[in-house]
Amino acid sequence: MNAQVTENPAEHRFEMPIDEGAIAAAYYRVDGDRLVLIHTEVPAEFTGQGLATRLATGTFELIRRSGRKAVLKCPFMARFFTDHREFADIVDG
C-alpha cells in the first residue's frame, strides 16, 4: 500500500486509496483561497496503521504546492500540525 494523496475538488476532499475501493479522506470547505479542513476519516478496520498521518502529510503537501492556505478546524489535523511545524507556512488561523 503505497498510495498517493490526491485532491477531489468535486467532493471537497483529499483522498488516499487504501484497499479494494476503500479510501481515507480529509474533507474541507473553501473560504476564498483557503481550505478549511473540517474532518478526517479512515475506515475503522484500518485504524492504527498510520494512514491518517500519511493522509495529513499528503494533504498539507498538496495545499502547499497549490499556493493555498489551510485553516485547521478538524481536531486530527490540528493535532498533526502540533507535531509537524514544518507546515507552518500553509496554516492560517
Image: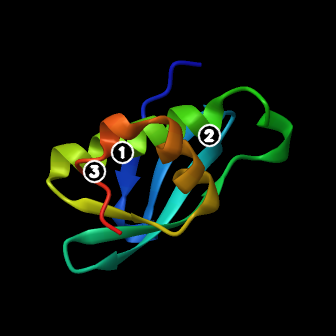
- Please state which amino acid type lies under the numbered disc 1: Phe
Determine which residue is flagged by label 2: 52
Amino acid type at circle 3 is Ile
Residue 27 vertical position relative to residue 52 in the rendered view, above or below: below
Left or right of 43 on screen, residue 83:
left
SS for callout 3: helix
Q: Position of residue 47 (x, y in %)?
A: 79, 37
Where disc 1 sits, the SS reads: helix
Q: Residue at x 30, y 47 (%)?
A: 88
- For the residues labelled 2 and 1, the Cα–Cα distance comes to 12 Å
Res 39 label: none
The residue beneath circle 3 is: 63
Residue 28 place in picture, x, y as percent:
45, 68
Q: Residues within 10 Å of mark 1 (few under 14, many from 20)?
A: many
For mark 3, does the 10 Å Cα neighbourhood hold few (<14), some (14 to 19), or many (20 or more) residues?
some
In which quarter of the view is residue 52 placed?
A: top right
Amino acid type at circle 2 is Ala
Residue at mark 1: 60
The furthest residue to the bottom? 31
**Residue that appears at 54% across and 43% down:** 80
Q: For the residue labelled by badge 2, is the local secondary structure a helix, a strand or a loop?
A: helix
Spot the residue most to the left. Answer: 67
Quarter of the image holding residue 68?
A: bottom left
Q: Residue at x 27, y 70 (%)?
A: 34
